[in-house]
Image (cartoon, helix red, strand yellow):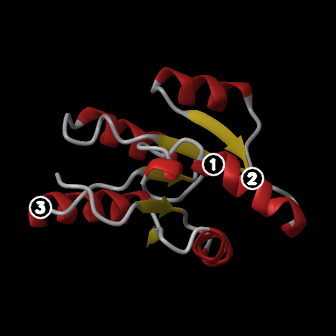
Amino acid sequence: MADETPGILYIDDDEDDLLIFGESIESLYPGIAVLKAPGGEEGIAMLQLLEQDGKPFPHLIILDMNMPRMDGRQTLKAIRSRNEWAGIPVVIFTTSTSIPDIEFSRSFGTVCITKPMSYESLGKVIRQVLSYCSPPLSKV
């Protein structure tokens, strides 16, 4: 698919996280479009719609691990099971610090980043998360 405005798909069931993190990305990187999905099923539906409409896939998917219905593990498995989506970088962005979650993420070629506990450290964490965009933001 042709490159257009770089985009990020942020999948998280926490409305506050979707709002705060999404707005922070948009203010730090105004050229980035942030699609927000309140759960794994909705995130998969967005990817299917982009594919169906011939629109570019996101340059990065940010995925919460602990969500009801379709959790981050199931969502990541679904993303990696489709050849068309397998190359999209995914960052697990979660409050979990468990070793099994980190190992699970690595087994699917993703990194697990812990959500910051304070608003003050959010900018630094956003830059860390966005460093996984493909292509890198400096080149888009």
The numbered mark, 1 or 3, whose residue comes first in the sequence reads: 3
Nearer to us in this view, 2 or 53? 2
Check contact, mark 2 vs mark 1: CB within 8 A.
yes
Pick the front one: 69 or 36: 36
Residue at image position (79%, 62%) is 122
The image shows residue 70 at horizontal and vertical percentages of: 42, 53
Residue behind mark 3: 54
Q: Check disc 2 and give the amino acid type.
A: Val
**Residue hosting label 2:** 125
- Find numbered disc 3 in the image and state the secondary structure of the residue it sits on: loop
Mark 3 surroundings: few (<14), some (14-19) or many (≥20) residues within 10 A: few
Q: Circle 1 is placed at which residue position?
A: 129
Secondary element under disc 2, as helix, strand or loop, is helix
Q: Is residue 122 left or right of residue 135?
A: right
In the displayed orientation, state which residue is furthest to the front.
139
- Residue type at mark 3 is Gly
Determine the CA span between mark 2 and mark 3: 32 Å
| Image quadrant where residue 56 sits | bottom left
Residue 82 screen position, x and y as percent: 22, 37
